[in-house]
Amino acid sequence: MRLFHGLLLMSLVLLSFGGAASKPPSTTIPPKLYLQRGTIDLKVVNQANQADPLLQTVGGYAVIQFSGPVLLKQRQALEATGLSIIEYLPDYAYLVRGSAAQQAAASRIDGFYARGDWTLADKFHPGLLKLMRTGAYQGLALQTIGWDNQLTTAEQAVKAQGLKLDAISTIDQLIQLAQINEVRWIEVASTPKLFDQYARQVQQVEPVWTDRQLYGQNQIVAYTDTGLDTGSLTTLNNDFTNRILATQVLSAGGHWDDNHGHGTHVAGSIAGNGALSGSNPATHTYTNSMAGIAPEAKLVVQAFEATATGDIIGLPTDLYPMYQQAYDAGARIHSNSWGDATGPVSDTEAAFGGYPYNAQRTDQFLWEHPDYTMLFGAGNSGVDGTPSQAIFCTGGNGVVDPDSLLAPGTAKNVITVGASESPRPTGGYTGVPWLLLSFCFATAPINTDTLSDDANGIAAFSSRGPTDDGRIKPDLVAPGTNILSTRSYGSGAGALWGVHETNANYLYSGGTSMSTPLVAGTVALIRQWLGIQGLPNPSAAVIKSIVLNTTVDIAPGQYGTGATQEIPYNRPNSVAGWGRSNLSFITKPAPYHLWVADQTTGLNTGQMVSYNHTASQPLTVLTNTQPLRVMLNWTDPPASLAATQQLVNDLDLVLIGPDGTRYYGNNQSTGDRTNNTEGVIINNPQIGAYQIEVTAHNVPISSQAYGLSVAGPLREATGGGTPTPTPTAIATATNTPTNTATNTPTNTATNTPTNTPTNTPTNTPTNTPTNTPTNTATNTPTNTATNTPTNTPTNTPTNTATNTPTNSPTPTNLPTVTTTAVTNEYDVWIPWASK
């Protein structure tokens, strides 16, 4: 295979808003404010209502809303008033702190729409609001978050008022809690649980080992779980010898041994080397062993305790410092097989799919560490029917219900992993029907189906999406039933789903707990592969784009296409996401070809990058017998907890066919206003040259970098062997375009990469990148200041698998300037077939 380091010719188009990737904004639809307490038009609704204690205003805070997508000059003008921007609110608004005079000054900014109050209701989780408004609140253990997004400040203020967070039993006490100035947010206290409940063959791992010699060398993976084996390097399971880089104990006691068994099983799936099952690490021989996916990767162990029922002890409420600890130890991949309900468990609507503090805090960490890839299990909360007071579910129809995702798997920037079935013929719970696993699978065809009989099936327990704001989750699935991995010999550790028939050093287990570390292992191999080609510190955005762009479609699932069809044909969907994890792209022969662009120079509202066919980034389809796939992902800023929509910075993907047909990301008729991943799949693409446009529809926070991957029949076969790379010279371009637009802002936007890898782990590959570009693209943006809203979100995106084309004319009246810039751009050519 071959990756070129080269110049990327980009057409940077500074659009008047609404250009090539979206419809022109309407001048008649006023923007709405989408908050947990309701959808509001600030010019229509008078929020202050002293008769309703929840609508008491919070002094010093206000909402400033613009009439359309927020331009850089508007954000700068808002900051120039002296107001502090706290967070973005959908649509086109900011929560700000400052004086009445400063708020009045904001009303004079071009494009200002309205000012609104911030109220006590905006401090409450929606599940709590619902209980309060219906009079059903009877007391729950709570947690409070301060304005600095920390727990400590708010908790100290609460104690000073004589309140106890585990003894707030009345609505009056809740109101008193919200009136404390230091309290920004109130939600139910987190009580996380483990997601306990032939993977290499299904994921096509072994050809990547044998043909490409990718074993996870120089990759560091952190996992947060119940510890590892005996907790002593001298007596540790030989499957992990000399590969434990750091151990970090989260619970009391200072011990990282695994008295449960869950953590050791997870670690083995990521990086066990199979030493106790016949492997030979010295010769990289793993194929007939029980090794994990990345058997030569190193591990950072973060250990908590767990009860026999899976309740976690020791996990911090604020996850940020825990993530930072792993990052500082050198990890750039983090696997997590645990989670929690997203609201009061008594309210099934709020209990799943929400965006609580732990999801927001996870997004914040990833926004501030853009080279860190985080994975979470979707959860094991799938059911068919409504759970009753007994152990049964009623009203099942043979299809697992939507809306059962747990947090932090609902975070935008993580890779959320669901569980597919393993095709394992014997061992563990292989012959057990789903009905015996749970009486919530009592209806045909699920009830009599067994747990591990179809690689294209979804595990019934696997949590389904979408999230409450309509985002597609899980992102993908991987095998999660009867997974064989390492056994813990820690005192009291259990046998999980059973001991292997001939080798007692390995156990079976299942759940999204098991599917998640398998994908974490594949991420380690992908990251190593990128490092060999010259990018040892890729962004998480480009890694996620590759992971999702190379999945296998497993629709319709295992039950056919009738009323009980398991998986929709639309991709992405909220059952299997983009499909099942797969690494075969690394060994696929020509004409298959994959290239990626790690775009570190962020875009501001109205800017566009256009990709056209070149030798190093081919976009000419050679045959219609293979799909053409394009995947865009970006690490988005954390969303407001008070908002009902979590997308902050909104980019749009458009693929333009040879005949001018425009294919929008996620098969939207215009841009997707909900997800921070957008993909286009054309199963039978038209032969000829394509073009890709990435447009910044609305970027209210900072500027937005992204990762892009393109895969399909794009490369001519040229015989065997691996060609010698021929890097192209690196160049830095600084351009000040001249545009004839009617409204040229006075500010100059300077877009500098935000993810320059200054914190490379200590054991990064020796082939450090020589092509780390410095992209300083100085542009004078051209934005027509109509600033009226475009699409009112419906929170129910419609996605179909084949991306039904939308024929629309290409705009011709947009000022265009071509600039030469450089990104970390990687081009893959594989001239031989996989095994």
Image (cartoon, grey):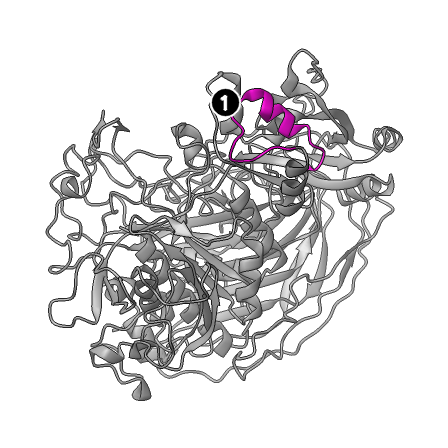
- The one nearer the camera, 145 or 373, is 145
Q: Can see residue 118?
A: yes
Q: Secondary structure at mark 1?
A: helix
> Circle 1 sits on which residue?
130
**Residue 47 in the image, given as x and y percentages of width and height:** 69, 18
- Residue 621 appears in the picture as rendered: no
Residue 443's place in the image compared with 695, above or below, is above
Q: Residues within 10 Å of mark 1 (few under 14, many from 20)?
A: some
Place of residue 540 in the rendered image (x, y in percent of width and height, measured from the top left): 53, 60
Task: Work out whether residue 54 or residue 315 is closer to the camera in this orientation and state it.
Answer: 315
Rendered location of residue 198, percent (x, y): 21, 64
Q: Quadrant of the N terminus?
A: bottom left
Above or below 188: residue 516: below
**Left or right: 647, with 87 as reference point:** left
Q: Residue at x 68, y 37 (%)?
A: 160
Which portion, as a residue range, is magenta? 162-182
Q: Is residue 163 magenta?
A: yes
Look at 34% across and 75% down and name the residue there: 295
Q: Tell me which secondary structure the magenta stretch mostly adopts.
A: loop
Q: Choose top left, top right, bottom left or bottom right for residue 743.
A: top right
Q: Would you say residue 253 sits in the magenta stretch?
A: no
The vertical placement of 769 against 488, above or below, is below
Q: Residue at x 51, y 25 (%)?
A: 169
The amino acid type of the residue labelled 1 equals: Lys
- Locate the C terminus and report the quarter of the image it occupies: bottom left
